[in-house]
Image: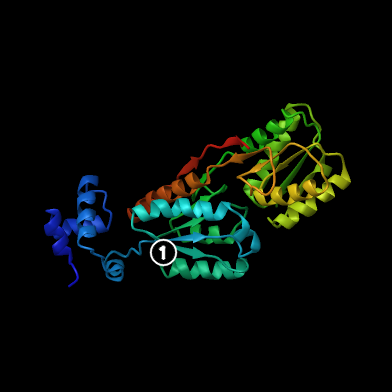
Amino acid sequence: MASTIKDVAKLAGVSPSTVTRVLQDKSSISDATKKKVRQAMETLNYHPNVNARSLASKKTNVIGVVLPEDSDAFYQNSFFPEVIRGIAQIAADHQYSIQLCTGQDNHQRLAILKDTILGRRVDGLIFLYGELEDPLVNFAIEQEFPAVIIGKTLSPLISFVDNNNEKAGFDATEYIINKGAKSIAFIGGRDQLFVSRERLEGYKKALREYNLKVDEKLIAQVDEFTIERGYETIKELLEAGTIDGLVTADSLFAEGALRYLNEKHIQMPSITFDSVRTSVQIEAYVDVHTLELGRSAFKILRNVIKSNNSKNMMCYRQIVSHSIKEL
């Protein structure tokens, strides 16, 4: 016979209403009491009726994770599964499930997001990217729906967690300059993405500070984050001018570029963001602490959800540190 809330309450030595408040993760219940109740639930193998709880509390205990457009780049890029892992780690601690939201293009993604928000299928959203004039983010803001961006936003009406990407771009370029390079190429993503434009600005700032020329012929901004585009782009850059150092804003670009350099037996100091596969050699990478980005995003979203429930929507800003790791 299945255990009930009364059974859990009796074993934990609390009232059934306290068990209910623990299930709702109410802040009025102490951590010690929550731990005792959850231990009783585990002992009794008690599983609450999620559908009934959702109807009663108007909470789903589900968060939506909004992905970029469905593409090969998403499935190849180690950043996304790692940041989702960070989100999932903290979500599990608070009995939240994750629902992925994506689509083949912006039209389909927006349609799915509208159904998700208007149907109240999730309690809040985490966007895994930040870009200028994103219709999905704008819709969430219009609906005053709890949301957090992992990345940058210009809107004061939505929370975000990010790195200082301009400083990270500067530090990455400075690292290559200190290796003796003077003609340094940069491969980044499209300008619409905040992370791409800020890392590029940091690269340019470092060159100027060290009195090195900012040569636009050595800068490439690529639409598709793929190994193939990294391979093709470094080939094009080498044909356009002399290069003795390389900064890439994404590990997939780095892997493609390094494959080409290895094939041509060209050696130069190189750095990227996040680690690349061991099949290619690279000097170092900028660790943006992806797991922490995910964990922080969920923590912030919980606070946003709570403030929204109290009709006092709050916005939060958090910057996660970065560090350079040599290989």
User: Residue 61 appears at what percent x and percent y?
Assistant: 35, 61
- Most foreground residue, 244 or 185: 244
Side of 264 relative to 78 (left or right): right
Side of 90 relative to 82 (left or right): left
- The relative height of residue 114 versus residue 303 in the rendered view (above or below) is below
Q: Residues within 10 Å of mark 1 (few under 14, many from 20)?
A: many
> What residue lies at 67% left-to-right and 45% top-to-bottom?
249
Side of 32 relative to 105 (left or right): left
Q: Name the image colouring.
A: rainbow
Q: Quadrant of the C terminus?
A: top right
> What residue lies at 42% left-to-right and 70% top-to-bottom?
119
User: Residue 71 appears at what percent x and percent y?
Assistant: 64, 64
> What residue lies at 22% left-to-right and 54% top-to-bottom?
39
- Most foreground residue, 102 or 86: 86
Q: Quadrant of the N terminus?
A: bottom left
User: Residue 40 appears at what percent x and percent y?
Assistant: 19, 56
Kindly identify which residue carries mark 1. Answer: 122
Mark 1 lies on a secondary structure that is: loop
- The relative height of residue 179 versus residue 56 in the rendered view (above or below) is above
- Most foreground residue, 59 or 321: 321
**Kind of residue sitting beneath label 1:** Val
Counting labels gives 1
Residue at the far bottom in the pictured view:
1
User: Residue 161 appears at what percent x and percent y?
Assistant: 50, 45
> Which quadrant holds residue 324?
top right
